[in-house]
Amino acid sequence: MLPDATCTPGATNPDVTPATLATTICKTGWTATIRPPVSYTEPLKRQQMQEYGFADPLSAHEEDHLIPLELGGAPRDPHNLWPEPGRTPNPKDGLENRLRADVCAGSIALGEAQHAVAFDWVAALRKYGSLDPTGGETP
């Protein structure tokens, strides 16, 4: 399922640019330093589930970053977070790892990867494939 583009258009982290890749997304473990705590994401998920019209339990959704942290998504911007149905890991996680690896290898531009996942991550998964189905960060 894709998020509602009006509720969740995506947002990027201004600290992540082509010039800062080596010290941000391409640095193993960097996303853990910026990931928002559950104390922030859980109340936001509850609110957004109401906005999306979801009536199922909170546990049936993951509060996910549309533009992933691995690709320079904004960590706390509600425009970049949405209550994705399903649990972790999910198919989007492997795509995020594939695109991050490709950006860090220089085979795709950061902006292109961000756009692909924000515009239609399902189509991007078909186009680019995935890495590490457990959703972990790849070196």
Image (cartoon, rainbow, N blue to C red):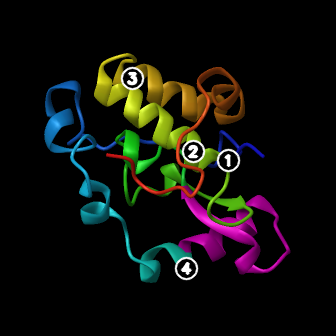
| Sequence order check, earlier mark of 4 and 3 | 4
Q: Which mark is residue 43?
A: 4
Are the two marked residues, 2 and 1, in contact with CB atoms closer than 8 angstroms? yes
| Sequence order check, earlier mark of 1 and 4 | 4
Q: Which mark is residue 94?
A: 2
Q: Which mark is residue 111?
A: 3
Q: Which residues are magenta?
A: 44-64
| Sequence order check, earlier mark of 4 and 2 | 4
Can you tell which quarter of the image residue 14 is in? top left
Give the CA distance from mark 2 to mark 3. Answer: 19 Å
Q: Residue type at mark 4: give it.
A: Pro
Give the CA distance from mark 4 to mark 2. Answer: 26 Å
Are the two marked residues, 1 and 3, in contact with CB atoms closer than 8 angstroms? no
Give the CA distance from mark 1 to mark 3. Answer: 21 Å
Q: Residue type at mark 2: give it.
A: Gly
SS at mark 2 in the image = helix
Q: Which mark is residue 91?
A: 1
- Residue 121 seen in the figure: yes
The answer to which of 26 and 112 lies nearer the viewer is 26
Q: Residue type at mark 3: give it.
A: Gly
2 sits to left or right of 111: right
